[in-house]
Amino acid sequence: MSAISNPRLPAPSPVKPVLEPGTPSPKGGSSKWLIGLALLGACGYAAWQTWQKRAQPSETAAVRVAHTAKVTTGQLDLRVRLAGQTSSSEYVSIVAPVMRGPEAGRELILLHLVPTGTRVKKGQLIAQIDAQTLADHIDDIGDDIEKADADIRKRKAEQEVDMASLLQNIKVSESEFRKASFDARAAEVRTEVERELLKLAEEEAGARYKQVQGDIAQKNVIYGAEIKILGITRERHVRHRDRHQVDLKKFTINAPMDGLAVSQQIWRSSEMSTVQQGDQVTPGQLFMKVVNPSKMQVEATINQGESDSFRIGQKASIKLDAFPGIELAGHLFSIGALATGGYRQQYYIRTVPVKIAFDQVHDKLIPDLSAGADVLLTQSEANAKQVPLAGVFEDGGKEVVYVKNGQTFEKRIVELGLRNSTHAVVKSGLQEGEEVALELPFAPADTVHASL
């Protein structure tokens, strides 16, 4: 059959073309046609290659550099960072004295003030307020007291003179009454009219004598009232002086306890600054605290939505912004009962105040330092498998990872447990030492080449 279907024919002999007269030579035209056909073929081949790559993806089409991380074991901590300010839980506030005298609004200038951060002992002088004006005022009040004493002595002398004159009048009235009585008893030798006149004279002298005697009691009451009024005036001056003497003692302020002197902030020259020697303070103004540096704490706030996760006694790791190399241990010891709002926040935003106590003492730990506390909310088991959250993806509502398998990655569904901001505990789906991709694989393919 092969011989019939494929008969062997003799090779054709070459035929030389015959050129007719007037026909141009085909050498130049044939070369152009060949070049055009070659270009057309190259374009077709390129299009075919592109179609082949799209229709049948190869491993080289999915090549992508993928960073990996290994599944490790260890204890996973869930911590929350709280920002706050350091303070002391044991302190005494030093305020400018409130004067008890009527001149309570006079200026108070700090003549002496220990520098902030000074270690002080109980009873040590820490502040001295200018008291010269008050001392001069007390001297003036003393002059008023002396004047009141002089007025009392003068009035008593005048009363003694008045009383002596009154007693003299009583004696005169008594003599007149006795004379009238004597004349009345000798009235038998007189006429009826004369006897009547003598009787009337006796009655008049007796009434005048009784009246003068009654004036003594009335004068004693008047004199006593006048002396009492002058005594009240003197007592008012004495009490005024005594109140200022108490104020004068308050102008010298001694440390109420052993501790650290911490100056407070005041408004000076349109900005807040620390109280300094020579500043003027107002009565009742807080200008210093003496704190116990061995009982320090961090005052912070938490969102009310997260307050259920916090418990008293939770451990914390505290860092100071001013001293990056210091990390101290602490624990949560106070949680506010009510959420509060800030004047710079919306009314519906509420925070709960918390306090974290330092379990360690450091020489550089002072009040009013900005600090951050990592509060430990919960922990996993000691040898729990952990995977970075950067290598966990969501696919169809499930959490998946891409595990390195040779030069490629395979998709695997995992079950995760406790997680923090960087890692999660693996309950199932991964083994220790396996590597997972930290970037999502190439979209069209389920595998990518691993990064070497």
Image (spheres, helix red, strand yellow):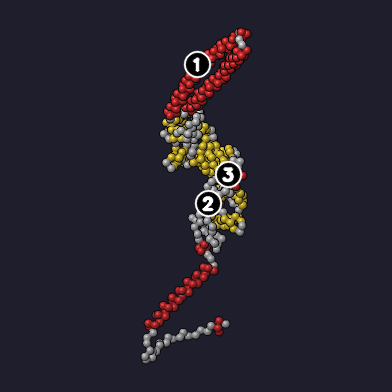
In the rendered structure, which disc, 3 or 1, sits on the residue that comes first in sequence? 1
Depth check, mark 2 against mark 3: the one in front is: 3
Q: Is residue 78 above or below residue 66?
A: above
User: Which residue is labeled 3 in the image?
Assistant: 340
Of tags 3 and 1, the one toward the viewer is 1
The quarter holding residue 125 reads top left
Q: Do the residues labelled 2 and 3 touch (CB within 8 Å)?
A: no
Element at label 3: loop
Mark 2, Cα crowd under 10 Å, few <14 / some 14-19 / many 20+, is some
Assign a secondary structure to mark 2: strand
Q: Nearer the viewer, residue 222 or 76?
A: 222
Q: Nearer the viewer, residue 70 or 208?
A: 208
Tell me the number on the disc at residue 69. Answer: 2
Mark seen at residue 226:
none
The Cα atoms of the two marked residues, 1 and 2, are separated by 115 Å
Give the x, y percent position of residue 300. 54, 42
Q: Mark 1 points at which residue?
A: 161
Residue 130, picture quadrant: top left
Residue 78 seen from this side: no
Q: Where is residue 449? Give x, y as percent.
A: 52, 59
- How far apart marks 3 and 1 lie (CA) works out to 77 Å
Helix, strand or loop at label 1? It is helix
Q: What's the residue type where badge 1 is placed? A: Val
Q: Which residue is drawn at 57% across and 40% down?
A: 354
**Most distant residue in the bottom direction:** 21
Q: Nearer the viewer, residue 360 or 354?
A: 354
Residue 250 position (above or below residue 47): above
In this view, the mark in front (1 or 2):
1
Q: How crowded is mark 1: few (under 14 residues within 10 Å), some or many (20 or more)?
A: few
Query: Horizontally, is 335 left or right of 271 in the view?
Result: right
